[in-house]
Amino acid sequence: MKVLVVGGGGREHAICWKLAQSPKVTKLYCAPGNAGIAQTAECVPIKATDVDEMVRWAKANAIDFVMVAPDDPLALGMVDALEAAGIPAFGPRKNAAIIEASKAFSKGLMKKYHIPTAKYETFTELEKALAYIRAQGAPIVVKADGLALGKGVVVAATVEEAETAVREMMEDKKFGASGSTVVIEECMTGPEVTVLAFCDGEHLVCMPSSQDHKRAYDGNQGPNTGGMGAFSPSPNYTPEVAETCMREIFLPTVAALKAEGRPFQGVIYFGLMLTPKGPRVVEYNARFGDPETQAVLSLLDSDLMDIFQACVDGTLDKADIRWKSGAACCLVLASGGYPVKYQSGFPISGLEGAGTSAVVFHAGTKAGEGGEILTAGGRVLGVTALGDTLERAIANAYAAAKPISFQDMHFRTDIGRA
Ligand code: AMP
Ligand code: GLY
């Protein structure tokens, strides 16, 4: 099969790395890809959000199957467009990808189907939002409705902070149209866990749980990032918690989407908080998470192409999905200054020194003129290792990262422990 993966970060590298192991995949492409992905797939210079060009290229090159990884092409309806062109595609259609693209939609869905989540109200008028914040008091959480690169959420410790956040979203249009509707919700407490699940519209199969580290610096300090590292499984996600989540959250979510005429085919990302009152949904995403996927897919012992096909065909209940025992840890090596301001274009040295006990997924890299690998983004590499225990996986990831360096390189020293 000729398979095309859409996207170009660490998540897509992990997906390509795993798909390349499938005997069914005879030729693998990635658009746009990056310098690391180029080692396993042929990169095609099409922007992930260019739906028309992606469909045209896939048709012209007789692609048999497309995997759409990032949120924005999913929200734009890339899967619908591929299907209309007769090309099977993994990922939710636009009407199901809305569980990530609109927080107002996903909160409404949870309310209607009694899926546990934080209490909330939705606002399109600034004055009403401000009055609600004053009435509720702090701490309180303010969220832009639409996609905001994971940065449209403010957990406000004071009423003033919450008011400023709402003004920035609704008055100053900090996130453009994404902030013209805001969701204001109750602040929950407890450990956070991510559960990714394969879905075929009707059935759901969970992957091992994981946790990411969103803050830039050690001890969960500093600004929110796309994720500075991840590990799997999460020790907080006990079999009892898993059972509760399946009954109260996962199955009801898949059934709700089906009942609404929005069957979900692809990966649902359940962002959960294990509160004193039980597990609650923090957010849904309509895709694999990054960097969680780098850790989670490292543990997959089955053929990923078979699973993708089962999701598209509606036969996930019959799929053979096995996982390795032990744990995985992904350590992100980032550009100094990320996520605020950073420079790129620096040569990366020591990549060959990482050894065979880890896989170095590339998140933001490009090839220089002489073929050397240069930094090309905020998150540059995801050094991912396995271990019999989480401690071993963490130690292996840090050991593999040791020889790697580039100017201004920054990473957290407490991945898996904070
Ligand atoms: P989100 O983009 O919705 O995942 O939110 C980003 C982060 O904000 C989450 O990972 C949580 O740490 C935090 N957060 C979001 N909603 C809440 C909430 N209702 N209570 C407490 N923390 C929250
Ligand atoms: N790591 C969080 C996300 O992918 O949304």
Image (tube, grey):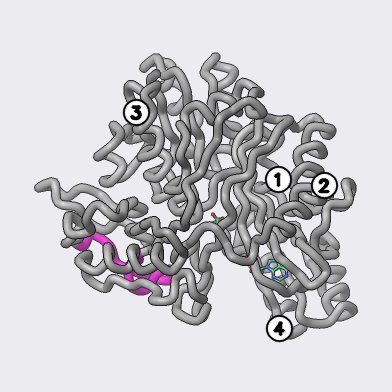
Camera sees residue 104:
no
Labels 2 & 1 near each other (Cβ < 8 A): yes
| Residue type for callout 3 | Leu
Q: Residue 334, percent across and down?
A: 35, 66
Q: CA distance from mark 4 to mark 1?
A: 27 Å
Which residue is label 3 attached to? 28
Tell me, yes or no, whether the highlighted magenta stretch contains residue 99: no
Which residue is label 1 attached to? 99
Question: Is 407 left or right of 219, judged from the image as shown?
Answer: left
Labels 3 & 4 near each other (Cβ < 8 A): no
Ranked by sequence position, the earlier of labels 4 and 1 is: 1
Residue 400 location, quadrant? bottom left
Residue 275 location, quadrant? bottom right
Q: CA distance from mark 3 to mark 4?
A: 48 Å
Which residue is label 4 attached to? 157
Classify mark 3 as within 8 Å of ligand 2 or not, answering yes or no. Answer: no
